[in-house]
Image (cartoon, grey):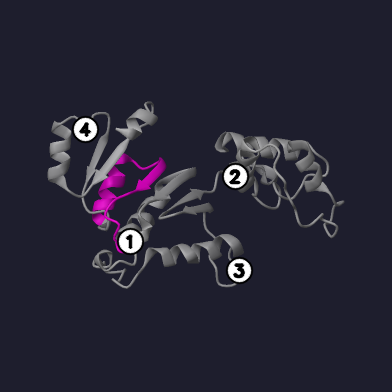
């Protein structure tokens, strides 16, 4: 009901293990407006069937299913490739990952000892080191974790000169990129790096809620290969 209320124009899909519950919910009209998938999210054959039926291409996936560590991992391995560039993958209730009752499910490639939050910690290294020091470089663009849950964003498509396609950016991210790009020199926050994600999603909304904020930046950029002060000029323009 929440998703239909929030996203009336979206192409909505719902997956559930309990076929009896799905049948009853369908009869009660609770799944009106939804496409339905049934089966175990930890089973590769089931996941392949889901992908085939839905044709993939998801902008958003929300895993609020069985919460077993190996189920979460199996689903992610299969479904992450079906997420469109710039899309989002949410995982809820991660806090139960170390509970005994949520370490009973295993697969041929995932033991009961596996804890999904440990994998998230590995992925933080992947994000930070981008293939260096034993990390992996893949198409995850950012990861945000709050109490009990995380969301991973897939890298948006890139055009020439390392500039992101504007239609794949959130409004605040696009505003940050446009503002930084209008200044000379252009800060490496949007060229060499993709920091528009965290500044667009967190700093700009924070400033909007607290325009009299007090902010400290460490590093003027005196050792950059362009003149120092690129970010200072950006902050003056934005704030």
Of the two numbered discs 3 and 4 in the rendering, the one whose residue sits closer to the viewer: 4
Q: Nearer the viewer, mark 3 or mark 2?
A: 2
- Residue at (50% x, 48% y) in the render: 153
In the drawing, what numbered circle is on residue 132? Answer: 3
Measuring 82% from the left and 57% from the top, which residue is drawn there? 224
Q: Judge the density around disc 2: few (<14), some (14-19), many (≥20) Cα neighbours within 10 Å.
A: few
**Looking at the image, is mark 3 or mark 1 earlier in the sequence?**
1
Residue assigned mark 1: 96
Secondary structure found at label 1:
helix
Magenta span of residues: 45-70
Q: CA distance from mark 1 to mark 2?
A: 27 Å
Percent from the top left, x then y, of residue 44? 27, 57
Q: Residue at x 41, y 51 (%)?
A: 80
The residue that disc 2 covers is: 202
C-alpha separation, residue under disc 4 versus residue under disc 1? 27 Å
- Residue named by callout 4: 30
């Amino acid at each position: 009901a929440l998703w239909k209320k929030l996203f009336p124009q979206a192409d909505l899909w719902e997956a559930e293990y309990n076929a009896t519950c799905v049948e009853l919910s369908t009869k009660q009209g609770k799944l009106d407006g939804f496409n339905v998938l049934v089966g175990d999210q930890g089973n590769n054959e089931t996941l392949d069937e889901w992908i085939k039926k839905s044709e993939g291409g998801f902008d958003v996936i929300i895993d609020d299913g069985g919460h077993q560590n190996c189920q979460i991992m199996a689903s992610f391995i299969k479904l992450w490739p079906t997420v469109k560039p710039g899309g989002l993958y949410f995982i809820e209730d991660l806090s139960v990952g170390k509970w005994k009752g949520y370490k009973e499910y295993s697969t041929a490639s995932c033991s009961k000892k596996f804890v999904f939050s440990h994998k998230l910690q590995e992925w933080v290294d992947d994000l930070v080191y981008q293939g260096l020091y034993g990390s992996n470089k893949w198409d995850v663009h950012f990861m945000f974790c709050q109490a009990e849950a995380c969301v991973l964003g897939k890298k948006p498509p890139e055009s020439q000169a390392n500039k992101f396609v504007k239609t794949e950016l959130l409004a605040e991210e696009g505003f940050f990129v446009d503002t930084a790009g209008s200044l000379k020199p252009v800060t490496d926050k949007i060229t060499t790096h993709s920091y528009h994600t965290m500044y667009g999603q967190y700093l700009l909304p924070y400033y909007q809620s607290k325009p009299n904020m007090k902010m400290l930046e460490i590093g003027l950029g005196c050792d950059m290969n362009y003149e120092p002060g690129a970010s200072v000029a950006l902050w003056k323009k934005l704030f």
